[in-house]
Amino acid sequence: MNHYLIECCANSIQSAINGEKGGSNRIELCADLELGGLTPRRKDILKTKKVLNIPIYVLIRPRGGDFIYSQNELSKMLSDIQFCKTVRCEGVVIGALKKNGSINIKQTKQMVRAATPMRVTFHRAFDEGNDLQKNLEDVIACGCDILLTAGQAKNISLGFKNLKKLVRISAGRINILAGSGVNHTNAEDLFKIGVRNFHLSGSEKNKDGVLETNSKNIQAVLEKLEGIV
């Protein structure tokens, strides 16, 4: 039996519902997907928890742009992490860099400590890093459970070789979660290089012109993975 996980990046309550309907094992809840995803409103976190039956990880990102955060921004992120812990979310999604592209170990460790006992994903800030292997080791050393990455590239197609390398050198010490461009056409290729965790929004513009997860896009990836012997 093959073991894998599909995480739906949901930018709204409805997207989260659609993601679960499509067969996702977990939701990453965010807002403003067009900005790369920001922290959702607290009332939306609470509403989503009420309507879903699968785990929710909440994106902790106070603004768009880079991942170099001031002390005030860090304080806001720590407050949001505390809220997620208080309302019993299963995990949070975080990340911080220094100006030179290295992992901001001090800030990341603070967020990981604040999140305990929730699980922690280090997000695609990693893909703007300056050293694939060193950045990986730093993320692991900070205590993160999961690394969301396209292999330090714009998307998984461009970062395919690096994803293969990350799976190999992580050696089970952290779960590599492939994201950015994952769909039913490349899921099998990712599986063949050892990826077992898949992240996608499966989003399309709905009838109102708003980006929203289409459950059929999630289901298509699930069916592709189920077909692998």
Image (cartoon, rainbow, N blue to C red):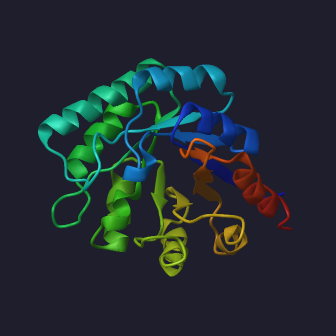
Q: Quadrant of residue 183?
A: bottom right
* Position above or below: 126 against 82: below
Residue 151 in the image: x percent, y percent? 46, 71
Count of labels shown?
0
* Position above or below: 25 against 152: above
* 210 on left or right of 206: left
* 137 on left or right of 213: left
* 184 on left or right of 176: right
Q: Residue at x 36, y 61 (%)?
A: 126
Residue 88 in view here: no
Q: Residue at x 14, y 43 (%)?
A: 70
Direction front: furthest residue: 208
Identify which residue, 139 or 73, lies in the foreground. 73
Residue 4 in the image: x percent, y percent? 70, 55
Q: Where the N terminus falls, by quadrant? A: bottom right
* Position above or below: 145 against 155: above
Q: Where the C terminus falls, by quadrant? A: bottom right
Residue 81 in view here: yes
Residue 73 in the image: x percent, y percent? 19, 38
Q: Quadrant of residue 152?
A: bottom left
Residue 228 in the image: x percent, y percent? 82, 67
Q: Residue at x 27, y 72 (%)?
A: 130
* Position above or below: 223 against 91: below
Q: Residue at x 55, y 21 (%)?
A: 47
Q: Quadrant of residue 3?
A: bottom right
